[in-house]
Image (spheres, rainbow, N blue to C red):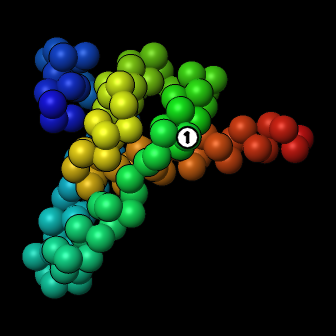
Protein backbone atom coordinates (compact mmCIF):
# COMPACT_ATOMS: atom_id res chain seq x y z
CA UNK A 1 0.00 0.00 0.00
CA UNK A 2 1.45 3.40 -0.94
CA UNK A 3 2.12 6.09 1.63
CA UNK A 4 -0.46 8.28 -0.12
CA UNK A 5 -3.12 5.59 0.29
CA UNK A 6 -2.18 5.09 3.94
CA UNK A 7 -2.35 8.84 4.58
CA UNK A 8 -5.76 9.05 2.91
CA UNK A 9 -7.06 6.19 5.07
CA UNK A 10 -5.92 7.96 8.24
CA UNK A 11 -6.71 11.57 7.35
CA UNK A 12 -9.44 11.32 4.75
CA UNK A 13 -9.56 14.68 3.01
CA UNK A 14 -7.73 16.43 5.86
CA UNK A 15 -4.21 17.77 5.76
CA UNK A 16 -1.51 15.11 6.07
CA UNK A 17 1.07 15.31 8.82
CA UNK A 18 4.73 16.37 9.04
CA UNK A 19 5.90 12.87 8.18
CA UNK A 20 3.84 12.76 4.98
CA UNK A 21 5.03 16.24 4.03
CA UNK A 22 8.67 15.23 4.56
CA UNK A 23 8.20 12.11 2.41
CA UNK A 24 6.71 14.15 -0.45
CA UNK A 25 9.57 16.67 -0.17
CA UNK A 26 12.14 13.84 -0.20
CA UNK A 27 10.52 12.34 -3.34
CA UNK A 28 10.77 15.72 -5.07
CA UNK A 29 14.41 16.06 -4.01
CA UNK A 30 15.25 12.56 -5.28
CA UNK A 31 13.53 13.23 -8.61
CA UNK A 32 15.37 16.55 -9.07
CA UNK A 33 18.77 15.04 -8.25
CA UNK A 34 18.13 12.13 -10.60
CA UNK A 35 16.98 14.45 -13.42
CA UNK A 36 19.99 16.75 -13.00
CA UNK A 37 22.44 13.86 -13.03
CA UNK A 38 23.59 14.59 -9.48
CA UNK A 39 22.81 10.97 -8.62
CA UNK A 40 22.34 7.80 -10.62
CA UNK A 41 19.58 5.25 -10.36
CA UNK A 42 22.22 2.68 -9.41
CA UNK A 43 23.27 4.84 -6.44
CA UNK A 44 19.63 5.21 -5.39
CA UNK A 45 19.10 1.45 -5.65
CA UNK A 46 22.18 0.84 -3.48
CA UNK A 47 20.94 3.37 -0.92
CA UNK A 48 17.49 1.76 -0.92
CA UNK A 49 18.98 -1.64 -0.10
CA UNK A 50 21.34 -0.20 2.54
CA UNK A 51 18.34 1.20 4.47
CA UNK A 52 16.74 -2.22 4.94
CA UNK A 53 15.97 -3.07 8.57
CA UNK A 54 16.53 -6.39 10.22
CA UNK A 55 14.15 -7.75 12.87
CA UNK A 56 16.05 -6.22 15.79
CA UNK A 57 16.11 -2.74 14.25
CA UNK A 58 12.46 -3.06 13.32
CA UNK A 59 11.44 -4.03 16.88
CA UNK A 60 13.58 -1.27 18.37
CA UNK A 61 11.96 1.30 16.07
CA UNK A 62 8.48 0.19 17.12
CA UNK A 63 9.47 0.26 20.80
CA UNK A 64 11.05 3.71 20.49
CA UNK A 65 8.10 5.03 18.51
CA UNK A 66 5.68 3.85 21.19
CA UNK A 67 7.58 5.74 23.89
CA UNK A 68 7.87 9.07 22.07
CA UNK A 69 6.19 12.27 23.22
CA UNK A 70 6.93 14.46 20.22
CA UNK A 71 4.47 13.16 17.63
CA UNK A 72 0.76 13.38 17.31
CA UNK A 73 -1.10 10.08 17.57
CA UNK A 74 -1.92 10.39 13.87
CA UNK A 75 1.75 10.76 12.94
CA UNK A 76 2.65 7.70 15.01
CA UNK A 77 -0.23 5.76 13.44
CA UNK A 78 1.00 6.76 9.98
CA UNK A 79 4.51 5.54 10.78
CA UNK A 80 3.22 2.27 12.23
CA UNK A 81 1.22 1.72 9.04
CA UNK A 82 4.32 2.37 6.91
CA UNK A 83 6.37 -0.03 9.05
CA UNK A 84 3.77 -2.76 8.64
CA UNK A 85 3.71 -6.02 10.56
CA UNK A 86 7.11 -7.32 9.48
CA UNK A 87 10.43 -5.77 8.44
CA UNK A 88 9.81 -6.79 4.83
CA UNK A 89 6.99 -4.24 4.67
CA UNK A 90 9.36 -1.43 5.60
CA UNK A 91 12.10 -2.82 3.36
CA UNK A 92 9.74 -2.75 0.37
CA UNK A 93 8.80 0.91 0.90
CA UNK A 94 10.00 3.45 -1.67
CA UNK A 95 13.31 5.16 -1.00
CA UNK A 96 11.71 8.41 0.15
CA UNK A 97 9.74 6.59 2.86
CA UNK A 98 12.78 4.65 4.06
CA UNK A 99 14.89 7.83 4.19
CA UNK A 100 12.37 9.79 6.24
CA UNK A 101 11.50 6.95 8.62
CA UNK A 102 15.19 6.22 9.17
CA UNK A 103 15.67 9.91 10.04
CA UNK A 104 12.70 9.76 12.45
CA UNK A 105 14.19 6.67 14.10
CA UNK A 106 17.56 8.42 14.46
CA UNK A 107 15.95 11.49 16.05
CA UNK A 108 13.89 9.38 18.46
CA UNK A 109 16.98 7.44 19.53
CA UNK A 110 18.96 10.67 20.01
CA UNK A 111 16.21 12.08 22.25
CA UNK A 112 16.08 8.86 24.22
CA UNK A 113 19.85 8.88 24.76
CA UNK A 114 19.79 12.57 25.75
CA UNK A 115 17.09 11.88 28.38
CA UNK A 116 19.17 9.05 29.81
CA UNK A 117 22.33 11.18 29.89
CA UNK A 118 20.64 14.22 31.37
Kindly indicate the quadrant of the structure image that contains residue 86. top left
Is residue 80 in sight in this rendering? yes
From this viewpoint, which residue is outermost toward the right?
118
Query: Residue at the spot x=25%, y=70% of the render?
Result: 44
Q: Nearer the viewer, residue 54 or 105?
A: 54
Mark 1 packing: few (<14 Cα in 10 Å), some, or many (20+)?
few
Query: Residue at the spot x=25%, y=44% of the render?
Result: 93
Kindly indicate the quadrant of the structure image that contains residue 67. top right
The residue that mark 1 highlights is 56
Q: Nearer the viewer, residue 2 or 28?
A: 2
Say above or below: 77 vs 41. above
Identify the image quadrant of the C terminus: top right
Q: Position of residue 69 (x, y in %)?
A: 62, 24
Q: Nearer the viewer, residue 109 or 69?
A: 109
Query: Residue at the spot x=78%, y=44% of the render?
Result: 114
From this viewpoint, which residue is outermost toward the left?
35
Q: Position of residue 65 (x, y in %)?
A: 54, 29
Query: Residue at the spot x=80%, y=37% of the render?
Result: 115
Amino acid sequence: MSYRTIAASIYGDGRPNRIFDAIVKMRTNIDQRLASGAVTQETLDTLHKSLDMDVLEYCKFQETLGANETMTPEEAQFIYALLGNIPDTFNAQPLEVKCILTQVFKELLERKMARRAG
